[in-house]
Image: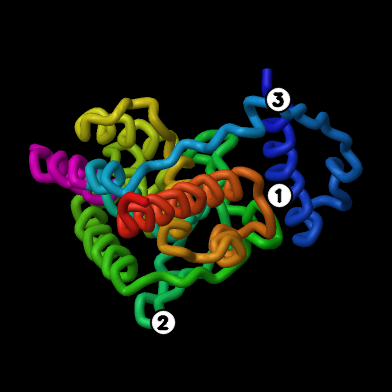
């Protein structure tokens, strides 16, 4: 049975899709309008819990592990898959994109000269990946243009170059109905949008190879990693929320205040060391 919070998230996704169908004239009205959903009660433990994220050294270890797996792979398809995964981890942790947004991302929306990425859609695969749907983002704030660094732009460029080679390798089996920047690296679904379960499976392998517990985080935790890295770099909470695509989010605040409080404590300790004994 779905938890109340999961029901709300599912309702939001379906509500957005149905609203889009109304605008397209596919249905007359949204049957989900006015639905009342349960609220999830917070416990004392929930209030204090900080979402899981990767520390900087852990993030680098996971990326290195993925690159090692790519170098050791015997089949070109597997090598591409691990190279793409290493870029996926890097980009998610440096942009704060949602997994569905990355899956739906088209190359045309990536501008590595202006250093921007337009987020205009998300991936839905309720009926399986062969019947995927590309719909509007999760919320109104989710439709946004995010800024990227030159280094992130270079990673995007490397992915798009590698993608061309993978497409040639896959031949006529490659999915051509739509073009995606990140794709399934498998023999039976090449070119289909990269799904979250695939990222999670590879993440578990990379975590283990890096000497980190397999269940430490899921792919969604990379979004929290972006928040932690940004907070450590002294980016404001407001700017982080804009990049993430929401006006306010409790989990983001918990990560942000956890990191900034830790930094403040470290600064106090530095001052103590500088002043010496009283």
Q: Nearer the viewer, mark 2 or mark 3?
A: 3
Measured Cα–Cα span from mark 2 to mark 1 = 31 Å
Question: Mark 1 = which residue?
Answer: 17
* Residue 123 percent coordinates (x, y): 54, 48
Q: Residue 43 carries which label?
A: 3
**Secondary structure beneath disc 2?**
loop
Residue at the front extreme?
A: 278
* Residue 103 percent coordinates (x, y): 46, 51
Magenta region, residue range: 64-85
* Residue 185 percent coordinates (x, y): 29, 43
Q: Residue at x 53, y 41 (%)?
A: 131
Q: Do the residues labelled 1 and 3 touch (CB within 8 Å)?
A: no
Measured Cα–Cα span from mark 2 to mark 3 = 45 Å
**Secondary structure beneath disc 3?**
loop
Q: Residue at x 37, y 42 (%)?
A: 54
Nearest the viewer among 38 and 275 is 275
**Secondary structure beneath disc 1?**
helix
Q: Which mark is residue 114?
A: 2
Q: Nearer the viewer, mark 2 or mark 1?
A: 2
């Amino acid at each position: 049975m779905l938890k109340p919070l999961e029901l709300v998230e599912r309702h939001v996704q379906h509500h957005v899709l149905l609203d889009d169908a109304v605008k397209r004239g596919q249905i007359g009205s949204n049957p989900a309008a006015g639905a009342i959903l349960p609220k999830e009660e917070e416990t004392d433990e929930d209030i204090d819990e900080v979402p899981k994220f990767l520390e900087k050294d852990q993030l680098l270890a996971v990326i290195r592990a993925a690159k090692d797996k790519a170098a050791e792979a015997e089949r070109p398809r597997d090598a591409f898959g691990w190279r793409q995964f290493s870029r996926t981890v890097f980009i998610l942790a440096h942009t704060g994109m949602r997994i569905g947004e990355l899956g739906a991302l088209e190359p045309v929306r990536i501008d590595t000269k202006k250093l921007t990425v337009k987020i205009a859609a998300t991936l839905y695969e309720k009926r399986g990946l062969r019947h995927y749907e590309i719909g509007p983002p999760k919320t109104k704030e989710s439709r946004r243009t995010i800024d990227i660094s030159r280094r992130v732009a270079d990673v995007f460029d490397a992915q798009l170059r590698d993608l061309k080679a993978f497409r040639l390798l896959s031949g006529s089996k490659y999915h051509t109905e739509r073009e995606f920047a990140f794709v399934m690296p498998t023999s039976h679904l090449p070119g289909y949008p990269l799904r979250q379960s695939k990222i999670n499976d590879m993440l578990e392998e990379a975590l283990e190879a890096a000497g980190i517990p397999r269940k430490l985080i899921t792919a969604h935790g990379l979004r929290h990693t972006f928040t932690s890295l940004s907070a450590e770099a002294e980016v404001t909470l407001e700017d982080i929320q804009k990049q993430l695509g929401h006006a306010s989010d409790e989990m983001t605040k918990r990560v942000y205040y956890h990191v900034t409080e830790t930094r403040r404590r470290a600064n106090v300790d530095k001052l103590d060391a500088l002043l010496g004994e009283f």
